[in-house]
Amino acid sequence: MKKIIGILMLTVGIVSGSQAQKLTAGKVPVAVKTAFTKLHPATKASWEMEKNNYEAGFKLNGKKTSEVYTANGVLIETEVAIKSTELPVAVLSKLRGVKIAESAKITKSDDTIRYEAEVNGKDLLFDAAGNPVK
């Protein structure tokens, strides 16, 4: 019984440790908030830590959107939620017969576009040609 409880506690610790850490706006560096406000004046955002970067979650044109910034306020990527039917045909063909829980279009700072599909609790990334990417 003690082993089961120990394993359960370890599992919960690992899962909760891997989730993004929510932040108050006061904990977000000024450079990050300034960069965000320049792009999105008068837009409210919720903030999280993603690895060593800062992620702003907000609505843009009615769509769930997030942007990831370095601590210096450099935009790394923008992720916009899309319907799974909006994924490129090549991506959809790779996922034929699989239930897609959520999907998004990710635009990197170098204008590279990736598509994300959540399948069985895992985020899978593809390029527009349907090739898996890391």
Image: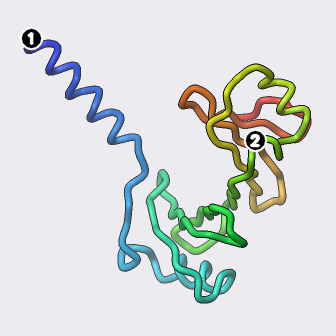
Q: Residue at x 83, y 52 (%)?
A: 112
- Residue type for callout 1: Met
**Could you tell me how far apart the alpha carbons at marks 1 and 2 are, in whole angstroms?**
43 Å
Quadrant of the rendered image containing residue 85: top right
Could you classify mark 1 by the number of other residues whose Cα lies within 10 Å: few (under 14), some (14-19), or many (20 or more)? Answer: few
The crowding category of the residue bearing disc 2, from other C-alpha atoms within 10 Å (few below 14, some 14 to 19, many at least 20), is some
Q: Is residue 2 above or below residue 102?
A: above
Q: Residue at x 51, y 60 (%)?
A: 53
User: Could you tell me how many numbered marks the image carries?
Assistant: 2
Residue depicted at x 63% and y 61%: 64
Mark 2, residue position? 84
Q: Position of residue 118 (x, y in %)?
A: 63, 36
Give the answer, above or below, for where 33 lies relative to 50.
below
The residue under the point 68% across, 63% down is 63
Label 1 sits on residue: 1
Q: Earlier in the sequence, mark 1 or mark 2?
A: 1
Q: Helix, strand, or loop for circle 1?
A: loop
Q: Say which amino acid is labelled 2.
A: Ser
Q: Is residue 22 left or right of residue 6?
A: right
